[in-house]
Image (cartoon, grey):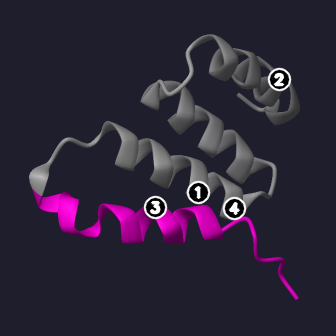
């Protein structure tokens, strides 16, 4: 808490060790937000949601959502 740069380093290591863990991804997204990387934070959180959600109601929309989340960091603010 209160040390987002240090938290980012810790969480980047955790991501390498526990790739795809939705808890790690959620905390990483929050740290990215704290560091002003809102689009990347939403991308990380959205992808973690899609990867961990087994709800069948999501299936018709999964690929469209994945494309939209993936595109978030490609655009640069003007």
Q: Which residues are magenta?
A: 57-78
19 versus 38 height, above or below: above
Residue 12, position as x, y percentages in the image = 74, 25
Lower position in the chain sequence, tag 1 or tag 4:
4
Local crowd at mark 4 within 10 Å, few (<14), some, or many (≥20)? some
Q: Quadrant of residue 13?
A: top right
Residue 17, position as x, y percentages in the image = 63, 11
Look at the numbered disc 3 and give the secondary structure of its residue. helix
* Outermost residue to the left: 56
Examine the structure image and report whether residue 13 is included in the region drawn in magenta.
no
Residue assigned mark 4:
38
Examine the structure image and report whether residue 77 is included in the region drawn in magenta.
yes
Residue located at (77% from left, 32% from top) = 2
Question: Is residue 52 or residue 1 the one in the foreground?
Answer: 52
16 versus 50 height, above or below: above
| CA distance separating discs 2 and 3 | 26 Å
Residue 14 — which label? Answer: none
Residue assigned mark 2:
9
Question: Is residue 75 or residue 35 the one in the foreground?
Answer: 75
Lower position in the chain sequence, tag 3 or tag 1:
1
Residue located at (69% from left, 56% from top) = 40
User: In which quadrant is the C terminus drawn?
Assistant: bottom right
Check contact, mark 2 vs mark 1: CB within 8 A.
Answer: no
Dominant secondary structure of the magenta stretch? helix
Lower position in the chain sequence, tag 2 or tag 1:
2
Look at the numbered disc 4 and give the secondary structure of its residue. helix
28 versus 11 height, above or below: below
User: In which quadrant is the N terminus drawn?
Assistant: top right
Residue 50, position as x, y percentages in the image = 37, 49
Residue located at (45% from left, 61% from top) = 66
| CA distance separating discs 1 and 4 | 9 Å
């Amino acid at each position: 808490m209160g040390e987002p740069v240090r938290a980012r380093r810790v969480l980047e290591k955790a991501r390498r060790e526990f790739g795809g863990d939705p808890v790690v991804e959620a905390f990483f997204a929050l740290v990215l937000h704290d560091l002003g990387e809102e689009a990347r934070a939403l991308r990380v959180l959205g992808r973690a949601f899609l990867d961990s959600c087994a709800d069948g109601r999501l299936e018709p929309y999964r690929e469209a959502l994945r494309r939209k989340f993936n595109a978030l960091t490609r655009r640069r603010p003007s």
